[in-house]
Amino acid sequence: MTGPTRAAPSMDSIAAALAASGYIATTAITTTMFLALRLQKPVLVEGPAGVGKTELAQSLARGLDLPLVRLQCYEGLDEAKALYEWKYAKQLLYTQILKEKIADLTGETGSLSEALAALAGFQDVFFSRAFLEPRPILRALEDPRGAVLLIDEIDKSDEEFEALLLEVLAENQVTVPEIGTIKASVAPLVVLTSNATRELGDALKRRCLHLYIDFPDSERERRIVRARAPGISEQMLREVVAFVQRARSEKLRKLPSVSETVDWARTMVLMNADVLSPELVRDTLGVLLKRQADVAEVTDRIDVLTARARADAAGAG
Amino acid sequence: MEQVLAGFLRALRAAGSRVSPGEAIDAARTIALVGVADRATLKTSLAAVLAKSREERDTHDRVFDLYFRREFMAQKDEPDPASAPARDRAQANAAEDSFQALAESGDDAAIASALERAAAAVGAGDIRFATQTSFFARRMLEALGVERMEASLMERLRAGGDDNDRAADAMIGARLRMQRLARRVVEERYNVYGRPATETFLDDVVARRSIDALTVRDIARLKVLVARMAKRLSDRHARQRRVRDRGRLDVRRTLRANAGSQGVPFKVIWKIRKKDRPKVVAVCDVSGSVARSVRFLLMFLYAMNEKIADLRTFAFSSRLADVGPMLDGNDFDAAFERILRDLGGGSTDYGQALADLSDNHRDCVDRRTTVVILGDGRSNHADPRLDLFRALADQAKRVVWLSPEPEGQWGSGDSCLLQYRPHCTIMAHCATALDLERAIDDILGAYD
């Protein structure tokens, strides 16, 4: 099943590939990616915003040394932007050249029907590969090395687009009515991400493996932050992560994501702080929380939260 | 392993997960790929292939734990399926004579594997209701030859004497012990195969029962069910909000897009029509007679907050108040109790409530709004203020009146429902959770 350019990866090699590109994966993530590669099935990654869904595809591409083709979804995305497009201007140019050459081609023929017969052979040229402009999905299918195709935020696209994807996801092929079916020589690894702003269609889900990435536990979050904000002291790292973990159990509209934890940790490094004090938290809370209501909510309880976070950090140490 | 996987898929389906044949094939390939040695890896792998949402994943993990605890135990004793039938027969013959010996052997593994085989022989996997447990346990003991032992037990009891009494006691003890173990095996089967089916059945019963007739236990069950129904409705109406109007050309954008091809319209752009977002104003009578239905209507509406983003809620008995802020983001039950305490006491006056609505909250109803009124229309003979109601109906997209009373009682005594009826888009009897679901489905349907 696997192509000539890709050796069948083992579970360990995938874990190693992810680790090499700096992605701290759980066993569930590694296992699912392993299955995706071996069963040649697309993966649908769901989870709250900012837990590293997109990052997963990027890291995997880097780790496996495959090109990454990214398709950002939005309302109104259609096949002309996702699959392929005809090069209209070039086709127009071609018709003009044809007009000039037409006398040469039909010169020796006597009647109109003979002229038409002579031209019939050129009809197909107009809608041919030469005039086909590949868009991300077709590009990923045609890459001889194989590719990681990241279809980002599929929930933002329309339902029609979902239907359009089914052929690609199930068969690794695209059908262009004028040309025929274009099949991938090496099946790409397709990663779809969704923030669940709407429920995806059943047909799409049934064709994918499913991976739910939740907010990381404190141990994994510490490892992520340590990798992303290198200058941070161990003490500060523990306290920052403990605070964020606490904050996630508060009643907030938008829970702080991992990327915001990383930003907050970097802020602490810049401010040369070693200890998480209520004042420091109050000053920098905007990095962590992006909604005024949430900031107000946490500000009221900042002393309690900070004290508890520090206790958690000390306990974990 | 095929047999084991088939059983697992059956258990999953019994628990309400949908497993397609394609997914079953994927599951088989997955097992071939990762093997069964590492239980944790097997669990995450099968979850990735078989569970397609967070809820399905929870179901999967629960069923996996229940199922594979038992299956692996039986597997260990039966490494070679080919020779198993022959050995089974031999063991069954032996067991007939030695039901007691088996019970007293103290060999847990042997007892467990004998019980597993007995369970398979009597089809304990077909159990549907908890009350069948004793029946299947008894059948299992019979399959293990308990009847033979019982016959000799009777003889000994008839004969009497110290020796016989002692032997009889031992037999009774053996039977009791095996009975307990057999029951446990059947209960496990019930948890895997039977319980989910029973749950579905009970859910269905509760959804069709009149809200007034619900017991405390029903209410707890209905709460979970309402959340699920709301999710289902949200999914059904989760459609895109913009539709391409394929009949009408967007000339300006078409010319612009084709500027590169000298205005030759290779690419045609159609006008886009935007759809209304559902906008709901709920006006609820919270006097004693209707409060219960109101609770579930509001629970339903608030469970759908991702779909109905624009929801205003008013409650009244004599005076009307905006209760949206109280319900928003707070614990629903506590907030609702408070609303009942604050507003539920007065004598019902629909006319006054309509006056309050049009005086203080006139701006919340526009031509995109559906007004949902939940009440019995019993206004204690006060002026129903039909003039205000007509104005409200003119202003709104639709007016949906849900009455907990059946149609035969509309207009009887102090009920003004028949007077309000001509101005409503729909007036419907709404007594069960299923009725509620249908009503809300209809309300959202007007926006699709």
Image (cartoon, helix red, strand yellow):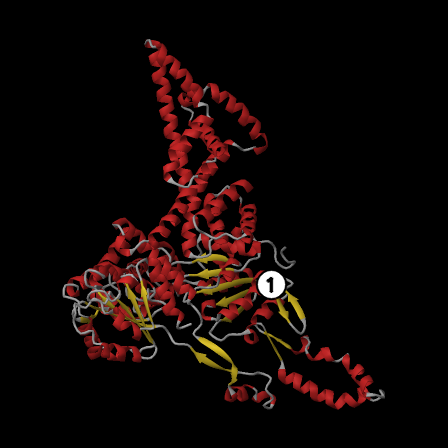
Image quadrant in which the C terminus of chain B is located: bottom left
- Residue under circle 1? A172
Res A68 visible:
no
Displayed quadrant of residue B134: top left
How many numbered dots are placed on residues in this image?
1
Residue A92 horizontal side relative to residue B176, left or right: right
Q: Residues within 10 Å of mark 1 (few under 14, many from 20)?
A: many
Quarter of the figure that contains the N terminus of chain B: top right
Chain at numbered mark 1: A
Please identify the residue farthest to the left as the structure is shown.
B346
Nearest the viewer among A181 and A271 is A181
Tell whether A6 sits left or right of A268: right
Quadrant of the rendered image containing residue A223: bottom left
Give whichever of B406, A61 is nearer the camera: B406
Q: Is residue B184 above or below residue A34?
A: above
Residue A151: give x, y in percent of width and height: 51, 67
Residue drawn at x 59%, y 86% as measured from the top left: B265
At which x and y percent is residue A92? 66, 86
Amino acid identity at mark 1:
Asn
Question: Under tag 1, what secondary structure?
Answer: loop
Task: Identify the residue at image location x=14%, y=66%.
Answer: B347
Indicate the position of residue A264 as horizontal and vertical percent values: 33, 66
Eyeballing the image, is A129 above or below B98? below
| Residue B48 in sight in this render | yes
B287 or A295: which is nearer to us?
A: B287
The residue lying at 43 percent from left, 43 percent from top is: B193
- Residue B36 in percent (x, y) is at 51, 42
Q: Is residue B380 above or below residue B15?
A: below
Taking B366 as reference, is B190 left or right?
right
- Depth check: give the residue in front, B65 or A34: B65
Residue depicted at x 56% and y 62%: A169
